[in-house]
Amino acid sequence: MRKPLLATLTAVALGAAALIGATGTATAAPNQVSGATPTAATAALHPVGTPASVTASSFAGTVALSNCSGSLIRMPNSQATDPGLVMTNGHCLETGLPSAGQVITNQSSTRSFTLLNASAGTAGTLKANKVVYATMTDTDVTLYQLTRTYAQIQQSTGIAPLTLSATHPVQGHAIDVVSGYWKRVYSCSVDGFAYRLKEDQWTWKDAVRYTPECQVIGGTSGSPVIDTTTGQVTAINNTINENGGSCTLDNPCEVNEQGAVTIRRGTGYAQETYGIPACFTTGNKLNLSATGCTLAKPTAIAAH
């Protein structure tokens, strides 16, 4: 994964070097070590489509954290009076990376986020009062509850939340990875899906694989991945294979249903988010026992 940047480093100081690094690796070819051909059953779960139209994403609704990117998001059924939610990666959690199998819920937080407007200017500051959900098991996500409702946020900043899509990402669709930390948009397409994506101790399910144009860098972790045909969030950016290593930190590998491993050097990945809305009920309340909720559960809940 792209490790969170240290809070003491500034985006200004790092920007030039990071952009140069991204340019230098943009043409790196995938390094195929072994095949990972999907089975017919797996392929049937993944829609394939060609976008009819493409709309450039703006920065409105994205946020900058001290070390990562993120977004102000709503579920498809969220109401204006619900407390706002900010989404970023599990590995961007301020208390440290959750270990494999660890699920954190309802943990107190006082984290602040810089909310951006369409042109990447500062629209305001958002504050969390708790970590609603965080894990690096099956996916890589942290969801924060904010101290203000969507209506209050929009009234004071003019910014509306991004909507999480409740449908599976589509292979071939154009996407934008919008980094609030770097104030930069990476545009590419959904190349396909990894049955399992393994990095160090963590394993993620059904990950989105980018086409080579999205050469994401440190600080882009947690960026919303926008399907440009719908304008909705279809995934959350989380990692890239940096130097061709196999299943090690910063070098994720793909594992298919038969256990065959594929290493794709220079390829970036995101975690799907379409399953998250099923785990939130009225008032943006987390309910991991809700019908259709497939998010990893804390041990006590899973035991039931």
Image (cartoon, rainbow, N blue to C red):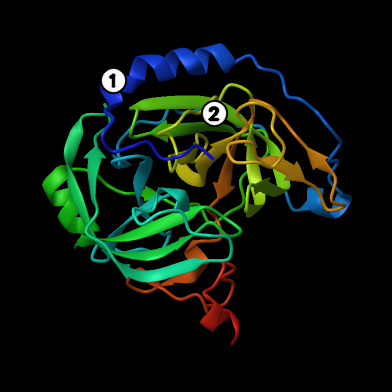
Question: Which is more N-terminal, label 2 or label 1?
Answer: 1
Give left or right: position of 65 versus 36.
Answer: left
Rendering coords of residue 135 (x, y %): 49, 60
Is residue 89 toward the left or the right of residue 192 in the image?
Answer: left
Type of residue at label 2? Ser
Q: Position of residue 29 (x, y in %)?
A: 71, 18
Residue positioned 58% across, 21% down in the render: 213
How far apart marks 1 and 2 lie (CA) works out to 37 Å
User: Taking 121 as reference, is 243 left or right?
Assistant: right
Residue bearing the label numbered 1: 13
Name the residue located 58 percent from the left edge and 37 percent from the top edge.
250
Pointer 1: residues within 10 angstroms few (<14), some, or many (20+)?
Answer: few
Residue 198 seen by the camera: yes
Above or below for 295 versus 33: below
Mark 2: few, some, or many residues within 10 Å (few <14, many ≥20)?
A: few
Q: Nearer the viewer, mark 1 or mark 2?
A: 1
Q: Residue furthest left?
A: 156
Task: Tell me the kind of residue under disc 1.
Answer: Ala
From this view, report whether residue 235 is shown above or below residue 209: below
Name the image quarter holding residue 64. top left
Nearer the observer, 248 or 120: 248
The residue located at (43%, 43%) in the rendering is 222
The residue singled out by tag 2 in the image is: 53
Nearer-the-camera pick, 245 or 22: 245
Q: Secondary structure at mark 1?
A: helix
> What numbered label is drawn on residue 48?
none
Tell me where residue 6 sits by quadrant. Answer: top left
**Residues at circles 1 and 2 in contact by the CB criterion of under 8 Å:** no
Quadrant holding the C terminus: bottom right
